[in-house]
Image (cartoon, rainbow, N blue to C red):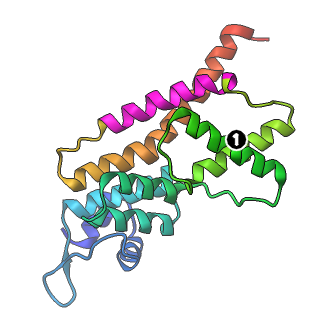
């Protein structure tokens, strides 16, 4: 297909598609003349992935560039690809010069060790959780393992389900695509379902007060 058809089918402007090509997010089309290139279903699939990462996952172009580079590098294993994606997503919380934050980060590290989870020391989620612990404590909500246990169980079950859905025997491109969908998009599904469930639980307990 020509770039105009790729634009129509993807819903993106020709200018946006050319921008993604320049930024290395989308491969160039196959040149058929000095002024014309042909594109195929792989380009359309990549564009749909970029749209999802941008619009649903809210990832900046720089983060998508890192993810796409990992996807296209056959030397990058699936776990490394997953880690690259998670680190690219962030959010990246700046560590303040605050003893409360440092104490919270130590608590997070201790929790990860206690749970026996294999997580990189530089995982952005460690800092995010520490940042949240500080905010909760300042609002008068101390953090205990008892409080966290339901969240740990839910997170463990959801994460296991997501990883099982990734088919290791499929072609690498398809496996990577599935991994990105589970990592970025289903996190939004989980957030939305949590909020819906909270509203339902509130209605069940407090009625229409």
Q: Is residue 206 above or below residue 43?
A: above
**What kind of element bears circle 1?**
helix
The vertical placement of 68 against 105, above or below, is below
Q: How many marks?
A: 1
User: In percent of the image, x 78 and y 50: which residue is there?
Assistant: 101
Residue found at the far bottom of this picture? 34
Residue 209 x/y as whole percent = 80, 11
Residue drawn at (64%, 15%), measured in percent from left and top? 201
Q: Which residues are magenta?
A: 146-164
Left or right: residue 161 compared with residue 1: right
Residue 86 relative to residue 50: left or right: right
The one nearer the camera, 21 or 174, is 174
Determine which residue is flagged by label 1.
107
Give the percent coordinates (x, y) of residue 54: 48, 58
| Residue 151 picture location, percent across and down | 59, 27
Q: Is residue 151 above or below residue 112?
A: above
For residue 119, above or below residue 30: above
Of residue 29 and residue 178, the one placed in the foreground of this image is 178
Residue 158 colored magenta? yes
Horizontal side of 111 relative to 23 (left or right) equals right
């Amino acid at each position: 297909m020509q770039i105009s058809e790729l634009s129509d089918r993807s819903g993106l402007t020709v200018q946006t598609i050319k921008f993604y090509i320049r930024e290395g997010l989308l491969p160039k089309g196959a040149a058929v003349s000095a002024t014309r290139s042909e594109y195929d279903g792989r380009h359309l699939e990549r564009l749909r992935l970029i749209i999802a990462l941008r619009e649903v996952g809210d990832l900046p172009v720089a983060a998508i560039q890192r993810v796409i580079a990992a996807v296209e590098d056959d030397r990058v294993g699936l776990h490394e690809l997953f880690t690259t994606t998670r680190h690219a997503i962030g959010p990246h919380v700046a560590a303040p010069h605050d003893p409360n934050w440092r104490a919270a980060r130590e608590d997070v590290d201790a929790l990860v060790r206690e749970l026996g989870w294999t997580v990189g020391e530089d995982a952005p989620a460690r800092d995010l959780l520490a940042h949240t612990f500080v905010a909760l404590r300042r609002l008068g909500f101390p953090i205990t393992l008892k409080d966290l246990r339901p969240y740990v169980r839910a997170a463990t079950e959801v994460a296991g389900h997501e990883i099982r859905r990734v088919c290791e025997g499929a072609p690498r491109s398809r496996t990577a695509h599935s991994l990105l969908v589970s990592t970025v998009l289903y996190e939004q599904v989980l957030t939305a379902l949590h909020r819906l469930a909270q509203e339902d639980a509130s209605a069940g307990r407090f009625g229409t007060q």
